[in-house]
Each structure stands twice: as structure tokens, then as C-alpha cells.
Image (spheres, rainbow, N blue to C red):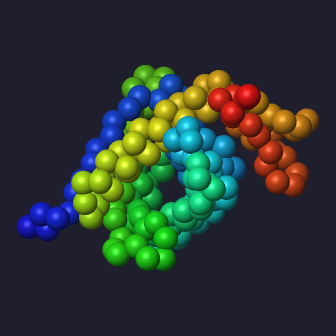
Amino acid sequence: MTDPAMHRLEVRRVVHASVSRVFEAWTEPRHLRIWWGPRDVRCLDASVDLRVGGTYRIVNGMPDGAQVTIFGEFRVVEPPTRLVYTWRSGPDSPASELVTVTFRPLGRDTEVTVIHDFISGPALRDGHMKGWIGCIEGLNRYLAGSDLEWTRDAPSPAVEGSPPPAGPLVHKRKRDKP
């Protein structure tokens, strides 16, 4: 029996890209740094050791200038269809939450389902819900190529076969234009 104080959410969306492209964008830092986060949050840094027992770390830049670090450990890695990982946000997190992400082919598209378990309360659950919806919307825009404008002469790391730009990744989301 689960603790009634723990909450769960489920977000299901269609992303207009193949399962392999969606899985790659979800699990490779060079992609995560560009699309991760709802519109008002920036991914400042990301690292991923994609294997069972491997860890991940994502640093979010919040609208108020604060930074929130999300980190955890992979429990299941089944490329390109399923990931299960723990989720903690900051050193003061009371306990690990658990995220299961499935990627299901729908012709040329992919259905992404995020199930986030063991959330400590309804307010946090609602915040996570907003975050996941925003993340998947950003992923969809990123893979469609409609959300980025490069601010220097460098190939987009989203283009298959192109090397990542040297130095720090510099990009600007179109929505950030004055």
C-alpha cells in the first residue's frame, strides 16, 4: 500500500519526431541544455551517465535568478523506449521521487509518457506537472527546429553528424527576443 501523502502525476504528449531522435534528445546533455525546461526556465548545465546505476544532473536557471539542481540515478535504461530514474531537487530534498518515461512509436511521431511518483504533496505535484508539460512542449519545438536561434556561427548540435560547437553552448530561444 502506498503512503496517502505521496502523490503521482502522469503527462502524455505526442512529439513530432522518431523514437530514436526523441530518446537521444532526452538522454544527451548537448540536447538537454537546449530544450529542457518550461519556457521560463533555462538548463544551465546537464550531465548524463546513461546506464543502470549511472547518474544524471540538470541545473535549472529559474526566472528569479535562483538555480535548482535536479539529480538522480538510473534504475532502468531500455533504449529507445523506456527510462526509470530517481529524482531529487537539491540537497535538502526529503526523499527521492521516481520518474518513468516511455517513448512509444506512433508512425513517424512518438508518444512520450512521464509518470512521476512519490511526490510529497499536491502543490509540488502541480509544479512538477507544469514543468513536465513545459519540458515536453520545448522538446517538441526543439526537434521541429522552431524554437532556436543560434547567436554565433556554429552548426546546431541537433543536426545529425555535426560536432557540438567549441566552447560554451551559446543559443537563444526565439521567445527570448525583446
In the rendered image, which quarter is residue 58 located in?
A: bottom right
Q: Quadrant of the N terminus?
A: bottom left
Q: Quadrant of the C terminus?
A: top right
Q: Residue at x 66, y 49 (%)?
A: 33
Residue 13: x and y, percent? 38, 32
Q: Residue at x 65, y 29 (%)?
A: 175
Viewer-side residue, 77 vs 129 = 129
Residue 104 seen in the figure: no
Q: Is residue 73 left or right of residue 63?
A: left
Q: Residue at x 39, y 42 (%)?
A: 130
Residue 66: x and y, percent? 59, 60
Residue 18: x and y, percent? 52, 31
Residue extending furthest right?
A: 153
Viewer-side residue, 168 vs 52 = 168
Q: Residue at x 59, y 61 (%)?
A: 67
Q: Is residue 15 left or right of residue 124?
A: right
Q: Reply above or below: 132 against 119.
A: above
Count of numbered tags: 0
Residue 121: x and y, percent? 25, 60
Residue 37 seen in the figure: yes
In the rendered image, which quarter is residue 168 located in?
A: bottom right
Q: Reply above or below: 4 against 145.
A: below
In the rendered image, which quarter is residue 35 located in?
A: top right
Residue extending furthest front?
A: 64
